[in-house]
Amino acid sequence: MKPFEEQSTAWVDGKLTGKELAEFEKQLAERPEAAAEKDEALRLGNFLRAHPTAPNLGNGDFFNHQIMQRIAAETPRPAENKRAAFWSLPRLALAGAFCLATALALYKTTIPTDAPSSEEPKYFAQVVEAWPADPSISATTVYDPADNVTVVWLDGLDYIPATYALK
Amino acid sequence: MPVRAILVLLSVLICGALVYAAAGGTADKSAGKAAARSADSSANTIWSALVLATNVSTPKRPPAELQACAPRLQRVFGYNQFEIIGSASNELGDRAESWLVPSESFWFGLKARRAVSKEARGGYLLSLQLFQNKRPLLETEVKLAPGSPLFIRGPQYGKGQLIIVLQVQP
């Protein structure tokens, strides 16, 4: 059996016939306001049929703007919510721990300590100037970085025979 | 910008500032200690030796003073035996003039002052005059860090080569 509202709509539209109409009219006897509702519905239907187009709006753009604003205000913003949720407390704690670890790593790697270095001290012997006392003598400075040797190379010195006793 | 993001940035900045401050303080402390160490080690000596380098079929072991640098000397000069003919050492005083006489044949007139450069590590700027007997051979200024020998290639002697070694003892 159809529900009362459906039968009522069909009754208002004049589509109930025969047995269905008889049964429905029995039910209407218990509802005295039904006749008034039918009249109201018929009047509304006639009015709508007589005015099929929407009324002209005096300021359509403003109306559209307000509608769009309301839609935007009532629509949830997933992207913004996601960004706000990025700095949650656990992430904040992680970021803090990361900062601390970075600071400690920098402290350990970049700051010299007082502990003695295990490396050998660097070789440093530098000839600033060299002036031979005699024009026949030339002095050249040779630095060999591979062997860490600095040599002042004197040329033009007199040969000393092996018979000469060096003391 | 969310407040939490600003807090994180602030904490990063504070961490950075703390590290920077700690680095500056420790570096200053280290520099101070290094300077103090340098000033304390005022009793350096300078050692010099006249060395005869030769090539022989059965070379002797180098003397103890040359053992550390003998392999380098061998590569640079091409001789396989090194003997010390004479050596001498002097205490180095700031701006003091002295003689350094490793042998009667080769000797130095010497004036020393502290080198201020970082590489010299508390070493000396030496003004040297090298003499062969009474004949001046060379005048030179050298910077020597402790433990870093300077070699002067002297004249040929017989089939060998005379080398003069100069080193600030640490």
Image (cartoon, rainbow, N blue to C red):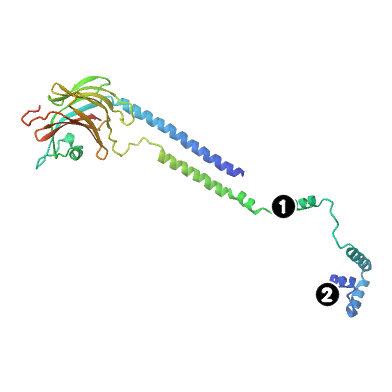
Viewport quadrant of the C terminus of chain A: top left
The image quarter in which residue B121 lies: top left
Give the secondary structure at mark 1.
helix
- Label 2 packing within 10 angstroms: few (<14), some (14-19), many (20+): few
Residue located 81% across and 52% down the image: A60
Q: Going by the image, does A150 lie left or right of B54?
A: right
Q: CA distance from mark 1 to mark 2?
A: 42 Å
| Three-letter amino acid code at the position of disc 2 | Lys
> Which residue in the structure is indicated by mark 1?
A72
Q: Are marks 1 and 2 in contact (CB under 8 Å)?
A: no
The residue beneath circle 2 is A2
Q: Quadrant of the N terminus of chain A?
A: bottom right
In this rendering, would B82 be left or right of A40?
A: left
Q: Secondary structure at mark 2?
A: loop
Q: Chain of mark 2?
A: A
Nearest the viewer among A30 and B53 is: B53
Taking the image as shown, residue A77 lies to the left or right of residue B153, namely right
Query: Seen from this angle, which residue lies furthest front?
Result: A135
- Percent across and percent down for residue A52 are 86, 63
Q: Residue furthest bottom?
A: A19
Crowd class of label 1 (few under 14; some 14 to 19; many from 20; radius 10 Å) = few
Q: Chain of mark 1?
A: A
Disc with the residue nearer the chain's start (1 vs 2): 2
Residue B18 image position (x, y, % from top left): 48, 36
Residue B54, quarter of the rendered image: top left
**Image position, residue B86 (x, y; %):** 13, 29
Q: Is B18 rendered above or below residue A84?
A: above
Residue A99 spot, x, y in % from top left:
50, 43
**Residue A71 against residue A125 in the figure, above or below:** below
- Tell me: B120 left or right of A107: left
Q: Residue at x 24, y 34 (%)?
A: A142
